[in-house]
Amino acid sequence: MRVTIKTLLNLPSLSHARVVAGEGGLDQTVDSISVLEYAEPTALQKSFFNSNEFYGNEIAITGFINIKDDIKAQCQTIKRLHQVGEVGIILYYVGIFMPKIDQKLIDLCNQLDFTLICMPENRIDIKYSEVIYEVIEIIVKNKLHDPYFVSEMLERISKLPDHQRSMDTILRLVSDRMTCSLYLVDSHFNNLNIANWPAISTITIHKIASYYRSTLSSLPVFPTTIAIERDICICSRAIQSEDASPLYLIMVKENGLLSMDLCDQAEEIIQLFINIWSRGHGKIGTDELVKAILNDEPIKMRRLAEILNINVKAVHHLVMIKTTQEHQDEKKQNELLATLQNTVTEVASLYFDVTFTGIYNDTFVLFLGGDKTKQACNNVREALLDMLSNQAYILVTSYGQANTTEVRRSFLLCNDYLSSARLIFPLKKSMTLQELEFAKYCYEIITKGERSIVDATSILTPLIQDEDFYDALCHTLTVYLLDAASNVTLTSTQLFVHKNTIKYRIRRINEQLKFDINKMPEHYNLYRAVAIRRLFEGQHNK
């Protein structure tokens, strides 16, 4: 039986709490609980979220005390919690510190199905510890009464977003369930992935390797107690990986004994994950290095980079090529992208030091180093566009990346918002990082609701007064700004009308709006408004 948010509401400590928003998330599984001490969305909090591991199914307790009057900050915090997989929050001290729960916060939680539970208001005597104790108790009891967790774990893995569905994530999920450390290594004890439990553990794979090399003994298949700094229980399993040498899962429990049954389940989960989602895990190749970077697996990335003699610190630019042919199986997509590998690499190497290339999901990725020529960024973009001109691909460029963390951010931005960018800029065969950022901004405006859309597009309202020409004027303005770079000749070509007609319509638009549409900042506000309008209509017509 799973422990859900709905289950928690039956606990005595939560019996008088009320669900304020996010009822759609009541069936979410809860595996842990934490306290959100510092909620203000500052650079410090951003660093905390970016540098810590979050794998979902956690509920947080907070009073929003340091942002009690800042509704915008409260909403930003909820968005961040939702993005990293938290399932809800339990809000304390409403009416004491935080005056009330704002409707904007309620609307956001409902939109995200992020459950917002409010403890009894105007009560300062209620304590975090009561809820924490009962939630932890019911989670532990559930684990003891339902020791078989393979099915539950596979269901959770299947629901993870692609960029979180990595071996590091899976090891952490299993490690937390078993309360032991897990190491995935090759036959030479080279560490591919690691999940320490507890996080401050000083037992390392190097110490384990040294012990077995010095004793000339093999890793135990059955739980065995050995002494490394202190007594630990250790067990191992061989894991088969397609197109790669066998890997070994090493399980280590401090101050306790490993269950043979739990070890068998851990082996089954890791083996199934490799067979279903990570075929070839442990294979030495640039595709695996790309996967390690984009899945944020630093240990695996460093090991593969060392073996392949690749300096990942030299990466400064990222080029992605995605197929636009939808409803095509992954194998055919990869075959199409693989045919590009040699030619694209050859073209890119004329302008950059090509560090390495690879294929990840449906994307061909080039990691580029230093520029070889002046205007290298523009030149390689034009050369690649020319090469891809008659093919169903779209080029995404992201220049000036400081490190692999920024590279991963650019990839995720492309993964999440390229479809929105293509609705805004349907004629573009090439997208920049800035255009993806703009698409993200427009998408977020739309997801905030009708009021937000109306506010962002209100600048177009005067055109409605010209009923006879409203559709023609709006369409011309949209093409002029988004597709033709404010060029009259290009606009006339794309709309198949004479240049003088376009000039007349633009003059009419200026008259209705009472300003020159090419003047900043009015130009940007119009640009944003027609982009939001086009994106909204594009999503509505899908």
Image (cartoon, rainbow, N blue to C red):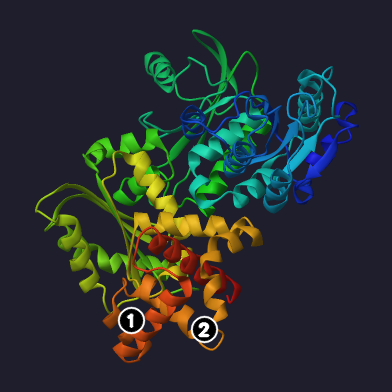
Neighbor class of circle 2 (other Cα within 10 Å; few <14, some 14-19, many 20+) is few
Residue 392: image location, x then y, percent: 35, 75
Neighbor class of circle 1 (other Cα within 10 Å; few <14, some 14-19, many 20+) is many
Residue 147 is labelled as: none
Dots 1 and 2: beta carbons under 8 Å?
no
The residue positioned 48% from the left and 78% from the top of the image is: 474
Observer able to see residue 1:
no
Quarter of the view holding residue 314: top left
The residue positioned 90% from the left and 32% from the top of the image is: 15
Residue that badge 2 annotates: 471
Q: Amino acid at mark 1?
A: Thr
Q: Is residue 43 left or right of residue 135?
A: left
Q: What element does badge 2 sit on?
A: helix
In this rendered view, identify the residue nearer to me: 171 or 22.
Answer: 22
Quarter of the view holding residue 206: top left
Q: What element does badge 1 sit on?
A: helix
In this rendered view, identify the residue nearer to me: 470 or 242.
Answer: 470
Q: Quadrant of the N terminus?
A: top right
3D distance between C-alphas at marks 1 and 2: 16 Å
Q: Amino acid at mark 2?
A: Asp
Compared to 235, does 466 lie above or below? below
Q: Is residue 91 left or right of residue 495?
A: right
The residue positioned 54% from the left and 35% from the top of the image is: 171
Residue that badge 1 annotates: 491
Residue 95: image location, x then y, percent: 80, 28
Observer able to see residue 455:
yes
